[in-house]
Amino acid sequence: MKVIVSRSGGTAGIRLTWEVRVDEQVDALNWADFLGSLPWNDVTDSEPLPDRYLYRIRCAPHEVVLAEPEVNGPWRDLIDRVQAANGRM
C-alpha cells in the first residue's frame, strides 16, 4: 500500500510530493490502522485559494483534495507522518 501526498500552490506555485510505502514501514500495522480510521468519505474536494496550499492525498482506492485551512486533525497527522517518513519535518 502506498500513500502519496502532493502539495501545490502557495505564492510560488511549486508542487512537492512525498510518498510512503506502508508495507516497508517498521510500524506498518499502525499505519494501516491509522489509514483505515481516516474520514475518507466525509471530505468534499476543495478548490484552491489564492496564495494558499492545496493538498492531494492518495491511498488507493481513496483520494482527497484539501485546501490548506482544512488540513487539521487526522489529515494534519497524516501529512506530518508521511513527511517524517521522508525525512522532512
Image (spheres, rainbow, N blue to C red):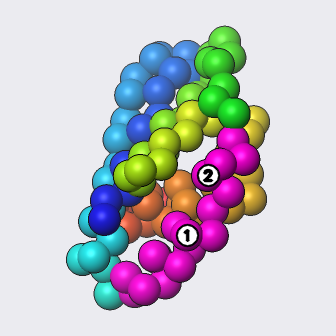
Q: Is residue 68 visible?
A: no
Most extreme residue toward the left, as rendered? 24
Q: Which mark is residue 36?
A: 1
Real-space CA distance between mark 1 and mark 2, rounded to the nearest whole angstrom: 9 Å
Image quadrant where residue 83 sits: bottom left
Dominant SS of magenta comes to helix
Residue drawn 38% across and 52% down?
Answer: 60
Most extreme residue toward the top, as rendered? 50
Residue drawn 42% across and 38% down?
Answer: 6
Q: Is residue 85 above or below residue 5?
A: below
Task: Give the residue number, with chain letter if any, for mark 2.
Answer: 40
For the N terminus, the image quarter is bottom left
Q: Disc 2 on helix, strand or loop? A: helix
Name the residue type under label 2: Trp
28 on left or right of 33: left
Percent across and percent down for residue 68 are 67, 34
Q: Which residues are magenta?
A: 27-43
Q: Are marks 1 and 2 in contact (CB under 8 Å)?
A: no
Percent across and percent down for residue 72 are 73, 51
